[in-house]
Image (cartoon, rainbow, N blue to C red):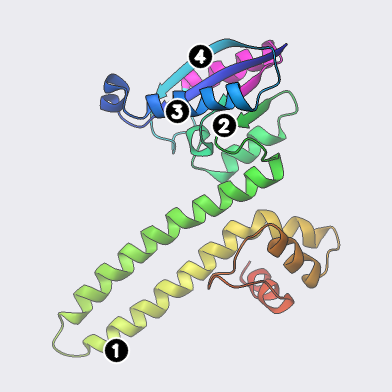
Amino acid sequence: MQRYVTYRRVSTEDQGKSGLGLDAQDRDIRIYLDTYSPEPWEIVGEFVDIQSGKDDDRPELEKAIALAKKHKATLLVAKLDRLSRKVAFIAALMEDKRLSFRVASMPYADKFQLHIYAALAEQEREFISIRTKAALQEAKARGKTLGGLRDATMKRNEVWKNLADARAKKLEGIVKPLRDKGATLRDIAQALNSASIPTARGGVWYASSVKAVLDRL
């Protein structure tokens, strides 16, 4: 029999009390169990945290993981960000050979694919943050009567440099291990393209663009 331990998380106390977010997670978990799980199956534990996904210290998640290991059950979550919003945290869970987990909304994704999805999601959140700061800086610069355009351009260039550095850092866990194992720049480019990971400009990878990322690292 396939055993599961389910884990749900909401970010605020209000969400926990009202059930906002929890119903949606319940629905996704139920769809996975009814559609994708081997039968018969059994839920041996259910846990809920009312805490930010940025926090690694979550007592109910720790209990869920411990119970899953004890019963050799699969930890089941509705979405990957319910486990954590940090790639490093998710990667650590993947390296734990005693723990198996599945993501209901990505029923066929293996660990490598989940790692890539986590990295891309983290990049997107960082991009949105940097883009917002850039927009505020440009708006402030436009309000200056002297040198406003030049200042705005310099700040915009600095933002894009920081964004490129941040994106390279997020890809480090993918490109560096491949490079360390002897993969050529062309091999790495093909691996990124096969995984549907776009470049910063939304294009395809070439050896030169992989080299640019490695140079930034």
Q: Image height check: is 82 above or below 39?
A: below
Q: Which is nearer the N-term, disc 4 or disc 2?
A: 4
Q: Amino acid at mark 1?
A: Arg
Determine crowd level at label 2: few under 14, some 14-19, many 20+ residues with C-alpha closer than 10 A.
many
Label 3 sits on what residue type? Gln
Mark nearer the viewer, 1 or 4: 4
Find residue 6 and report its horizontal and vertical position in percent. 54, 20
Residue 104 got which mark?
2
The residue to which callout 3 is attached is 25
* Label 3 – label 2 distance at C-alpha: 9 Å
Residue 48 x, y percent position in the rendering? 44, 20
Q: Which residues are magenta?
A: 59-75
- Residue 30 relative to residue 130: left or right: right
- Disc tally is 4
Residue carrying label 4? 46
For disc 1, the marked residue is 150
